[in-house]
Amino acid sequence: MSEVSIFDKIIAKEIPADIVYEDDWVLAFNDINPQAPVHVLVIPKAKIPGFSSLADQEAVQVGEFIKRISQVANKLGLDPDGYRVVFNQGKHGQQSVNYIHAHILGGKQLSWPPG
């Protein structure tokens, strides 16, 4: 069995979060350390360790996760001006929790390169 992460505890409602969207597939909540005026994390309810693990998942699960990221960004009103979706993978990618999560960043002109 995999290690219980902070995201597992948020899904189980053991740790509070400022939830902006929830359905059977995902949970989306405001990041506690925002890097933009809008900074929301979207996590699947079925645990996936990281982006590199997507290849091992059922296509429906991956597709529904990606669809929900788009739906959350739309619900947040980010579509007209745009936004960034970021996945961090592994140590060099600065993945801090071994549970896939998408960062939706928006609400201002973002700079490039990010890194």
Image (cartoon, rainbow, N blue to C red):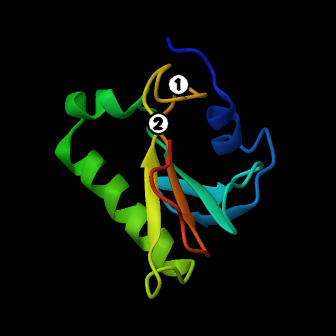
Q: Position of residue 75 (x, y in %)?
A: 52, 79
**Which residue occupies 77% across, 49% down?**
32
Which residue is identified by label 2?
A: 88
Mark 1 neighbour class, 10 Å CA radius: few under 14, some 14 to 19, many 20 or more: many
Going by the image, does 40 lie left or right of 18? left
Q: Is residue 64 left or right of residue 79?
A: left
Question: Residue at left 63%, top 21%?
Answer: 4
Q: Position of residue 23 (x, y in %)?
A: 51, 62
The image shows residue 80, relative to residue 74, as above or below, that is below
- Relative placement, left or right, of 20 versus 71 is right
Report the disc number at residue 71: none
Residue 48 at least partly seen: yes
Q: Position of residue 63 (x, y in %)?
A: 25, 54
Q: Secondary structure at mark 1?
A: loop
Whichever of callouts 2 and 1 sits on the residue coming sooner in the sequence is 2
Q: Amino acid at mark 1?
A: Asn
Q: Residue at point 50% right, 19% down? A: 91
Kindly give the residue lying farthest to the top in the view shown: 1
In this view, the residue in front, 100 or 59, is: 100
